[in-house]
Amino acid sequence: MDDLTTRPYQDADAEALAALVNLIDEHAGGHPGAIADDMRSLVSALVRDVESDSRLVFAPDGTLVASAFTPTPPDGGFRVDLFGGVHPAWRGRGIGRELLAWQLDRAREIHRAVGDGQHWEGHTAAVLGDQEAVRLFQRFDLEPVRYWFEMVADTAQAPEVPVPDGLRVGPYTPAHEAAVHAAHMDAFLDHWGYQSRELDEWATISVRSASFLPELSLLAWDGDELAGYLLAYSDADPDRAYIGQVGTRRPWRRRGLAGALLARLLAGAGKAGLSKAYLGVDAASPTGAVGVYERVGFTVEFRSVTYAIDLP
């Protein structure tokens, strides 16, 4: 790496970072959906100190060839989501090994400083076809712990699914931000890898992000109680909508609410001129989410895998 330059992330790097993320995903058979503004939101919300917790690697001509970030878990959390990657054309030179070693060392430093003796894990992920990334994870003794489906549906084939009796569906508005945050934290409490986040941190990377589409996002109400929600976002592909969060709180599950929200999203996205909608889901979701998505027309586009290691 003698001919390369390494420095912390800066806000002006967001465009190059999104391009790198998309290139890595596309190389492995995934969907290149990253947007620069979302990179800014993600880093600002999750990385507490970019000077000490981020590294970008540049070629002599200024091309961003690798990135690595080491976020601090939220208060009470346990998962350090190590994210980054190496440009496919620059692999095989030891860049990934050096960056992942740095990330793990930095994660252990953060754990010693603020972990209060709690058990922490380092997590990282890759599209399932990215064998180079998988070999790198295995080299550092990370193990596969969870698999994910990225699913896509055609908006032109949106089914008609009725809203369950007694519930009404309406649009998202900023006045509902706190209620949606509380509902999301509640709905995902029993999901694998769950970490509760404070409102401001969560909203920065969701409903306050530049890519958030309130006009396509939906809320389901039972009287004055929020029973479920679906939050939609724009994508690097202008023909796609991304469903970032969809959830049903426990008292209203098993009644078909999620399917009704998804069907309405597909219809609304189609009317807005979008041809596809996609989402990510835990392949082993305890809520039966995969089956719900399949019933309204979603099919698996590609798969990804999370690798993890204990942080002593």
Image (cartoon, rainbow, N blue to C red):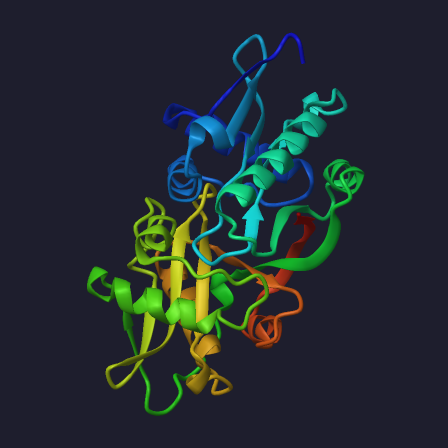
- Answer with the quarter of the image where residue 179 lies: bottom left
Q: How many marks?
A: 0
User: What residue is at 34 percent from the left and 64 percent from the top?
Assistant: 181
Evaluate whether residue 24 shows in this view: no
- Answer with the quarter of the image where residue 24 lies: top right
In the image, 246 versus 29, the foreground residue is: 246
Q: Residue 214 appears at what percent x and percent y?
A: 29, 58
> Which part of the image, by quadrant, shows the N terminus?
top right
User: What residue is at 55 percent from the left and 45 percent from the top?
Assistant: 111
Q: Is residue 215 left or right of residue 122?
A: left
**Outermost residue toward the left?**
175
Q: Is residue 241 left or right of residue 96?
A: left
Q: Residue 283 appears at what percent x and percent y?
A: 66, 65
In the image, 33 versus 114, the foreground residue is: 114
Q: Is residue 187 left or right of residue 286?
A: left
User: What residue is at 54 percent from the left and 62 percent from the top?
Assistant: 153
Q: Residue 9 appears at what percent x and percent y?
A: 45, 26
User: What residue is at 57 percent from the left and 8 percent from the top?
Assistant: 60
Q: Is residue 267 left or right of residue 225?
A: right
Q: Is residue 83 above or below residue 226?
A: above
In the image, 267 versus 114, the foreground residue is: 114
**Outermost residue toward the bottom?**
165
In the image, 119 versus 15, the foreground residue is: 119
Q: Residue 186 appears at what percent x and percent y?
A: 42, 72
Q: Is residue 302 above or below residue 267?
A: above
Evaluate whether residue 63 shows in this view: yes
